[in-house]
Amino acid sequence: NAGVTQTPKFQVLKTGQSMTLQCAQDMNHNSMYWYRQDPGMGLRLIYYSASEGTTDKGEVPNGYNVSRLNKREFSLRLESAAPSQTSVYFCASSEASSGANVLTFGAGSRLTVL
Amino acid sequence: KNQVEQSPQSLIILEGKNCTLQCNYTVSPFSNLRWYKQDTGRGPVSLTIMTFSENTKSNGRYTATLDADTKQSSLHITASQLSDSASYICVVSAAAGNKLTFGGGTRVLVKP
């Protein structure tokens, strides 16, 4: 059972370049999330999708866009990368967006913006 | 502002020894508290989830406690193993808006 799969695992970009992080889950979960993790800080929510067809901003949405392509897939796009977006990005999913639901995380995507 | 503070930031213990990690939070209204384990280069994995009415919950050698009155939680690791080397993250869920607040984590290194 793959769980949550993220691609790519590593990426180096130059300032101003664009890229898309892909995420897919095979657990039939309704809700999906994108977080970023920076050294010494807790994970911060960028965007989430409570259900297929809906997306909402999280705590740090600026500079990012998302697409809930279908129930399985949730992508994160950086239109014009900035050094401040150097981080490790995690996709997660849960059965529902209720706070009682446990998140299942992907392995992470390490992004460096030069 | 909802906050979750973890201590210590890091610790080193010898294999076979016990250790306790602390989590203090100001999230209100409280819904539940989770502990996650994050191995290096991997995503966090859930260890326990505790609601307001639960004081203690165990998962193998991991035991979490919760004092909702003082807004404190601890994670106790018994008879540590090398595989316990990881970051441990405390996450608190607010009852309003289902918002999760993550602590910065405690990095544990178990040495032989």
Image (tube, rainbow, N blue to C red):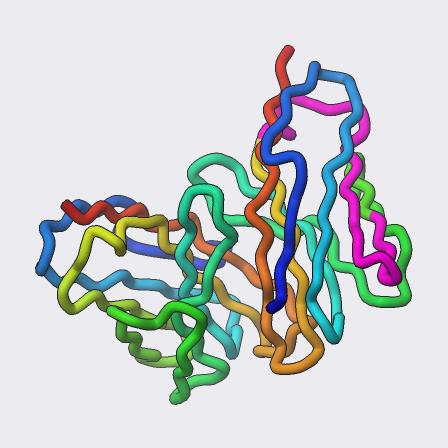
Front one among B5 and A56: B5
x and y percentages locating residue A2 in the rendered image: 46, 55
Quadrant in the picture for residue B52? bottom right
Specify the quadrant that holds the N terminus of chain B.
Answer: bottom right
x and y percentages locating residue B94 in the rendered image: 68, 73
Q: Is residue B44 above or below residue A100?
A: above
Q: Which residues are magenta?
A: B65-85
Q: Which residue sits at x=17%, y=59%?
A: A81
Outermost residue on the top side: it is B112
Q: Is residue B48 left or right of residue A49?
A: right
* Magenta-drawn stretch contains B66: yes
Quadrant in the picture for residue A99? bottom right
Q: Which residue sits at x=67%, y=81%?
A: B96
Outermost residue on the front side: it is B1
Q: Is residue B96 left or right of residue A38?
A: right
Specify the quadrant that holds the C terminus of chain B.
Answer: top right
Q: Is residue A5 above or below residue B95?
A: above
Front one among B102 and A99: B102
Number of numbered callouts drawn: 0
Q: Is residue A87 left or right of residue A58?
A: left
Quadrant in the picture for residue B15? top right
Q: Which residue sits at x=79%, y=37%?
A: B76
Q: Is residue A21 above or below residue A62?
A: above
Outermost residue on the bottom side: it is A53
x and y percentages locating residue B57 in the rendered image: 85, 51
* Magenta-drawn stretch contains B71: yes
Q: Which residue sits at x=62%, y=60%?
A: B3
Front one among A93 and A42: A42
Q: Is residue B19 left or right of residue A43?
A: right
